[in-house]
Image (tube, rainbow, N blue to C red):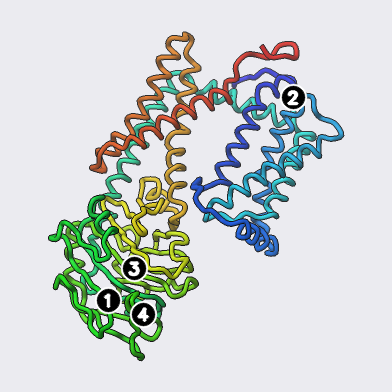
Amino acid sequence: MIKTKAYTLDELLYRLTNFILVGSLLCILAIVLFPYDFFFRPTLKETYDRFIMLWLELPFFTDLSLNIILFLPFGFGLSCLFRKRKKSGKLFPSLLAITGLSISFILEMLQTLLPSRFPSIIDILMNGFGTLIGGIIFQLWGLRILRAINELLAKIKMWLSPKRSLILFIIYMGLTLLLSGYLQITIRAITKLSNWDVNFPLVIGNEYSGDRPWNGYIFEIFMTDHAINANELKQVFSNRMPCVQRAENLIASYCFINGQVFNDRIGNLPSFKWQGNTSPTASGRGVLVNQQSWLETNEPATGLTEKIKATSEFTILVYIATNDINQTGPARIFSNSKDPYHRNFTIAQEGADLVFRMRTPFSGLNGSSPQFIARNVLNDRALHKIVITYKNNSLKLYIDGEQYPRFLQITPGALFFSYFGSLFFFDMIGYSLVFYGVIFIPLCLFFVSLINSLTKKNQKYITCGIGILLPALTYPLVWSFLGKQAVNFKNMGVCLGLMASFVFLFQFLLFPAGSYKNGRST
């Protein structure tokens, strides 16, 4: 049985304050700011509306409880800091509440930059309340809780001998390499376009079933079975009528001017014909499609599907203008599908957002898990030249010559979390970062335990350098090899940064420098 010293409260505060306070704050940041993808740029009115909307709604009891529980450890750690600095007194509860509310307010404001998060005034109040309760818990049972935490950490440190730490480090690194390698190989198979159906027609302005109408103008469409390069993109966007350099890859090209039938200028695919009950409308902006009139091919686009299946690449250009920025459904602009739930691909509109769905073995028959969403790109009625390319599991969007900042790519992290539920486009970065955490946090814990068990400084420095560099280089190299892609130096930099950050963070939290003697640190 392992016996631990009966430390005084001041000694325990010195040993554990950083561990509890910084650790609890990091947990709050990890949970509240997921998926760590700060992109959404709301106006002040939109921010105000989001707060007011959620303020008026009655939150679930579970949400209230979680917001309180999340800030309990922070309130406890903050109380440790105040007590350590001899700042307890009549103002103690007020300081706790104000600090908790301030931290929560900052985090809720940061959430306004996250499209998938919804900040709330009630969240701020519950977080502040949780901080206050954490302080009360410290006042009532602080010494007992600190001793229990200290004993647990002491037992863990005693159990993690140098040999065990090294063995666990090697085993965990091996297991995570196998897991991530399996995920990387799986991604290559499930993101190919092998399950595209050759029996689907092309439809403009609706679904083939006629129940997802889009109101807007269509001027031009062309498609290739390869992802066009930078030079070709410049040519596409510099000319009114696109002309792709690699003509052998051009599958179809349609120009929509006043008429009843629209032929493929290449001659590979069937013609578009009008559907509906009213006469179509034409203008200098192309032809107008809406709930009454839309375009379909009477035959499946078999040639298109077969060629794209063979390469698992494509480029789609549509030259369009919406006639209503508030359409929902999503309203179908251009599709290769048979009904609202089965498609090879769909370009659609949801409000001012552009939505793209694509069938793969991973995303399903409807291509909606996940679907690509480009915020606020259809917020006017001007003509826009939209290009979508897909290659090597990477879906990119270009609007009027500018690449949209986001792209869709299934990473090992996204695949890993797909086993636990549906994926969302705006959470893709978060899935990858959490997966990095699953790999590197335990690895760094074992490694920190190892280097602190060494007695000589030279041994510590050499081991520390090797232990940080080895995983940071090994993981990206294995991922690139198994994914049959060039070495991704960005991944290498991320891995190196995470390894170094976690090592120094755990060293700071678990092994504070100096010692406590006679009421002071040395």
Report helix, strand or loop for mark 2: helix
Given residues 406 and 466, the one toward you in this image is 406
Alpha carbon distance from label 3 to label 4: 19 Å
Q: Nearer the viewer, mark 2 or mark 3?
A: 3
Which residue is under mark 1? 256
Residue shown at 30% from the left, 73% from the top = 219
Alpha carbon distance from label 2 to label 1: 75 Å
Disc 3 residue type? Thr
Residue shown at 26% from the left, 61% from the top = 239
Q: Earlier in the sequence, mark 4 or mark 2?
A: 2
Which residue is under mark 3? 346
Q: Earlier in the sequence, mark 4 or mark 1?
A: 1
Horizontal and vertical percent for residue 187?
A: 30, 50
Disc 2 residue type? Lys
Horizontal and vertical percent for residue 161?
A: 48, 19
Residue 132 falls left or right of residue 281: right
Residue 139 falls left or right of residue 482: right
Residue 43 vertical placement versus 107 (above, below) = below
Q: Earlier in the sequence, mark 2 or mark 1?
A: 2
Q: Quadrant of residue 197?
A: bottom left
Disc 1 residue type? Phe
Residue shown at 54% from the left, 27% from the top = 505
Q: Do the CB atoms of the residues marked 1 and 3 lie less than 8 Å apart?
A: no
Residue 399 vertical placement versus 18 (above, below) = below
Alpha carbon distance from label 2 to label 3: 60 Å
